[in-house]
Amino acid sequence: MANPQHLLARLLNTPDLPAVVPRLPAEILHRVIETCGLEDCADLVTLATPGQLTRVLDLDIWRARTPGGEEAFDADRFGAWIEVLLQNGAENAAATLIGLDTDLVTAGLVRHAAVYDLGAVSAYTTLEGELVAGRRTHEGPAAEIGGYVLEAKRRSAWEAIVELLAHMAAEHPHDFHRLMRGCVALSDDPREEDGCDDLLDRDEQQLFDLTCEREGRRDQQGYVTPAQAHAFLRGARAIRLDAIEPPPSPIARAYFQAIDAARADNDVDAHETTADVASPLEPGDADGAIEVLRAAGVLASEPRALLGTGDGEGLRLRAIHQHVAGHPASAEELAYLANAIIAGCAIQDRPFTEREAADAAVAICNLGLENWPAHWIVRDLIAAFQIGWSILHRDVCMYAAERLIDVLGEIRCVDRDIQLQLDGLRRRLLRHVPDGEPWRVRGALEVIMMLDAPSWAALLALIDVCPAMHGAITAPRQSLRKIDPSAFEFISENRQIAAIREFMASLRQTLTA
């Protein structure tokens, strides 16, 4: 990967950049932001259209707290966007904000500031001459702008928000009041308990609606939600190979039906255009920018396992190559599977990269095709993935965890502290293996490193949501001078599983040597 600052400098020097950026796919623009950092990409963001930014924000300000977890609105990231927009002047920032969805902007603003009508919270004197003090509901900074009082809920981005809204009040009063009225409606006091207090408050309801709208947009774009991905992956582990034919996945079927429906709608509306939708790129339009990004490694190349079959990798993945060659729908199936892996799974307790997810999908499908039941006539990659995923869970993850339980029961270490940690690891495995989730003991596996670092790295890769094969399993022991937990490959064939069984069979001897 090229130096981010060097990459950004090359991009900004691309000819006709103001014409190219508005026509870049939002996903590419987001990759640039991730690579170079949002704070340094103000010039690029300013050139983007509202339609682009809506899709970029869908990717950027909704984040999962844990890899593969549910995504939630990140108010601090929204504040960071406000600060970045202001780098190129309040007028540019205001123009961008006005072009975005009002509900999205108000949802972000009310998580930074409560907004009230000035008259509703100001001090006043009663007819009897009594002075009634003004009302404050939040401690911290406050500001009066255009007839409204803003009280800070967060200090991050507070100055930027005040500056931007003050500019809008002076230069764009109509849009300013539209935003403020929405914020006032969402800044009401919490609902009183009246028997209906299980209902969402207004701001929570609006955020829920925004989440649903975002999921609808992403469904049409081919994304998979974490909930859908979790359900698909859990169901894949339970596939029955003794069924008469491959059991269909209702989740995958619903996904492809939604994609087909979105395509039909796009065909009907193809003649309609809107001001905030960028014109598609023509051949050669963005060759310079795309080449810079590809050379820098920002744009992933094709999944490694789908390259030509002349090399060792291609020969190892012969089953998937043969299937893809004769089934045009394979590309869409692999895209769905890679999206499901990214949305619902983790690797080494971190999110998958796009490249890793694509490679994992191909490898798991190859494993499934290699173990395809003879009585199932018609092959497809969704079922192949389910077969491979169930084999990985049963014959790799669960097998390794169960074998480790046996080994730990036989080890007696002279170091009392290490022995206590080994016993603790065994108890945790006994608790989580029946649930089918032995990867929950990941942190406790560190005690194995005290006995043998290569075995620890191998077990980390094997006892995981998506099991993988670490290089320590097959490398000569004398060559393992430095242990890198990330030096793994995805399991794609039965030969690798056989090597894993040999490794687990020798584990007790290795740990007690």
Image (tube, grey):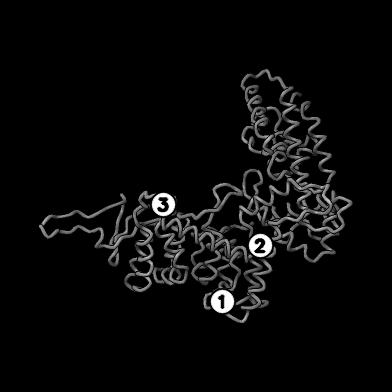
- In front: mark 3 or mark 2? 3
Three-letter residue code for mark 1: Ala
- Left or right of residue 251: residue 247: right
Give the mark, 3 or 1, whose residue is nearer the N terminus.
Answer: 1
Q: Quadrant of residue 157?
A: bottom left
Label 2: state its secondary structure.
loop
Query: On the image, numbered disc 2 is attached to which residue?
Result: 299
Give the mark, 3 or 2, whose residue is nearer the N terminus.
Answer: 3
Q: State the image coordinates of residue 83 (x, y, percent, origin top left).
A: 43, 61
Label 1: state its secondary structure.
helix
Mark sitting on residue 19: 1
What residue is drawn where x is 37% and y is 52%?
191
Q: State the image coordinates of residue 68 (x, y, percent, origin top left).
A: 61, 49
Q: State the image coordinates of residue 500 (x, y, percent, origin top left).
A: 80, 38
Query: On the image, numbered disc 3 is attached to which residue?
Result: 196
Give the Cα separation between the discs numbered 1 and 2.
20 Å
In the image as oriented, which residue stretches furthest toward the front?
Answer: 195
Q: Residues within 10 Å of mark 3 (few under 14, many from 20)?
A: few
Q: Residues within 10 Å of mark 2 (few under 14, many from 20)?
A: some
